[in-house]
Amino acid sequence: QVQLVESGGGLVQAGGSLRLSCAASGHTFSNSAVGWFRQTPGKEREFVAAINWNSRSTYYADSVKGRFTISRDNAKNTVYLQMNSLKPEDTAVYYCAAAPRIYVSSSPNDYDYWGRGTQVTVSS
């Protein structure tokens, strides 16, 4: 079992930066792939970034490539999402998710554990 708690969301102007954190509890977290997803009202959950258990593989949605960076610190049971050059279209609730069974994935269906999300709002 893994419990996830996101933090670091907030209101920022376009062009600004935020760093989201995903703090985990549970003994399988260090062996889990972790993904960040986002969702706006009326839309499906969208893949943002993912990282495998030992940080050797990272994947990004085209819309955030070059602006966002995912990283993890297994000693702290935490995964981060550094978001730079934010745009109004990045506004969403951001969720982290963990998947002990896979190497890494961009599909939300592959993730077993989810946090409750943190709101990111980018003003123009």
Image: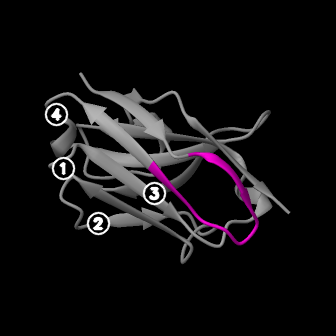
State left or right for residue 116 relative to residue 38: left
Question: Which sits in the foreground, 29 or 44?
Answer: 29
- Residue tagged 2: 57
Nearest-to-viewer mark from 2 and 4? 4
Measured along the vertical axis of the image, is residue 91 above or below residue 99? Answer: below
Measured along the vertical axis of the image, is residue 87 above or below residue 79? Answer: below
- From which residue to which does the magenta span run? 9-20
Q: Which mark is residue 81?
A: 3
Nearest-to-viewer mark from 4 and 3? 3
**Which numbered disc flags the more N-terminal residue, 1 or 3?**
1
Nearest-to-viewer mark from 3 and 2? 3
Q: Which mark is residue 28?
A: 4
Residue drawn at (78%, 34%), measured in percent from left and top?
A: 41
Nearest-to-viewer mark from 2 and 1? 1
Kindly check if marks 1 and 3 are in contact, taking CB atoms under 8 A apart as contact. Answer: no
Residue drawn at (39%, 51%), measured in percent from left and top?
A: 105
Measured along the vertical axis of the image, is residue 118 above or below residue 55? Answer: above
- Provide the secondary structure element on which disc 1 rests: loop
- Residue tagged 1: 74
- The three-letter amino acid code for the residue at tag 3 is Leu
**Which numbered disc flags the more N-terminal residue, 2 or 1?**
2
